[in-house]
Amino acid sequence: MQNSTLSSPLVLSLTFGTISDFNYVYGVISLLGFLMIIFSNLTIIYTVYLNQSLHEPMYVFISALCTNDLYGSISFFPSLIVNLFSKTQIISYAACITQIFCIYSYGSCEMAMMTVMAYDRYMCICNPLRYATLMNLTKEFKIIIGVWLYSFISITVHTMLTMRLPLCDNVILKIYCDNWSVVRLSCIDTSVNNIYGLFLTVKILGVMPLLVFLSYVKILKVCAKSKDNLLKAMQTCSPQLISFAIFVIDSLFEVILYRLGPAQVPYGLRVAMSLQCLVVPPFVNPLLYGIKIRAIKVRILQTFTWKKSYMEKQIERT
């Protein structure tokens, strides 16, 4: 530990370890990955926005999920890329706190959005006669706004509890800022932070996954009576189930990493585990929904085909 008078460091050091030996290679890979995430998620959002036929609850929820994935990626990748191309890997205290808020609100919103999407599928499949009334676009936008407000408010409290802590050290044990990495640097008792963090963990990785699980169990029970209905339900719900499973498993890896303690896990595995939630869902989700859901895939192909034909006609005219 450094001198305890260092209560509010202006700059924090990030731990890149052996990554620094190949920082330019990882920097290029990260930049390309970030650009692919931006392109794929914007393609889904733009396609849903552009096509009136996709202005239905399921597709708007998918668009909102992709918007949140963009938000999460923007809160993580730019800082990572800058540090990979820099000689020293540092981050200001203000930027670190901002990154904590953005990453955690992204994670909270991601789980809440997938819970809402599971409920939407449950209502559509199990209560088709009431679905149009219960899940119209006006109510849907209210739900999306409610999800974002809930996430931002709960994580604002979490972040403010962290900001009140004086710090005795300035070394973050990760390549980005997260709440645990900052709280562990505190000079005072952090019981309140630990209790609230446990409350959020149980709610996000306990209660919400349970609601999702119950929704899909009820869907399967209803659809099991007919083989055709079961196949249609699986075709519609499989992207959401895969997306949900990826996010929950990745989040549990991160929680397990905390429980084991960083020193108990090899550095390479530690980095890979800590990046799963921030890299995999934003990269995989638009691919899943763009390929698996036929209505979106068709509209994407039509959009790009129309643009290609339009450009070819313009070239012919010139």
Image (cartoon, helix red, strand yellow):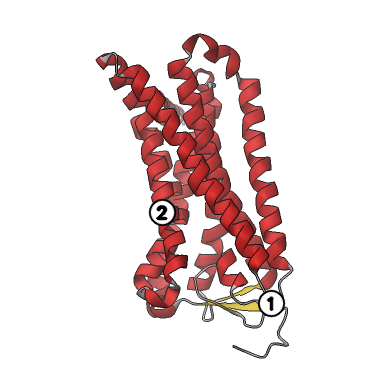
User: In front: 39, or 200?
Assistant: 200
Which image quarter: residue 261?
A: bottom left
Residue tagged 1: 188
Q: Residue at x 49, y 71 (%)?
A: 174
Measured as percent of width and height from the top left, residue 89 is found at 54, 77
Residue 15 makes an appearance in the image: yes
Q: Residue at x 58, y 74 (%)?
A: 184
Q: Position of residue 163 (x, y in %)?
A: 71, 67
User: From the viewer's perspective, is residue 92 above or below residue 297?
Assistant: below
User: x and y percent of residue 239 in the render?
Assistant: 37, 34
When asked about the image quadrant of residue 142, the answer is top right
Q: Around disc 1, counting alpha carbons within 10 Å, would you say few (fewer than 14), some (14 to 19), or many (20 or more)? A: few
Image height of 123 relative to 83, above or below: above
Residue 52 position in % (x across, y down): 54, 19
Which of the two discs, 1 and 2, sits closer to the camera?
Answer: 1
Q: Label 2 belongs to which residue? A: 250
**Does residue 274 appear left or right of residue 63 in this picture?**
left
Quadrant position of residue 159 = bottom right
Spatial distance from mark 1 to mark 2, Cα to Cα? 31 Å
Question: Which residue in the rendered view is the most extreme toward the bottom?
Answer: 3
Is residue 140 shown left or right of residue 127? right
Which image quarter is the N terminus in?
bottom right
Tell me, for residue 5, which label it has, or none. Answer: none
Q: Residue at x 66, y 35 (%)?
A: 145
- Mark 1: amino acid: Ile
Helix, strand or loop at mark 2: helix
Question: Closest to the observer: 51 or 183?
Answer: 183
Residue type for callout 2: Asp
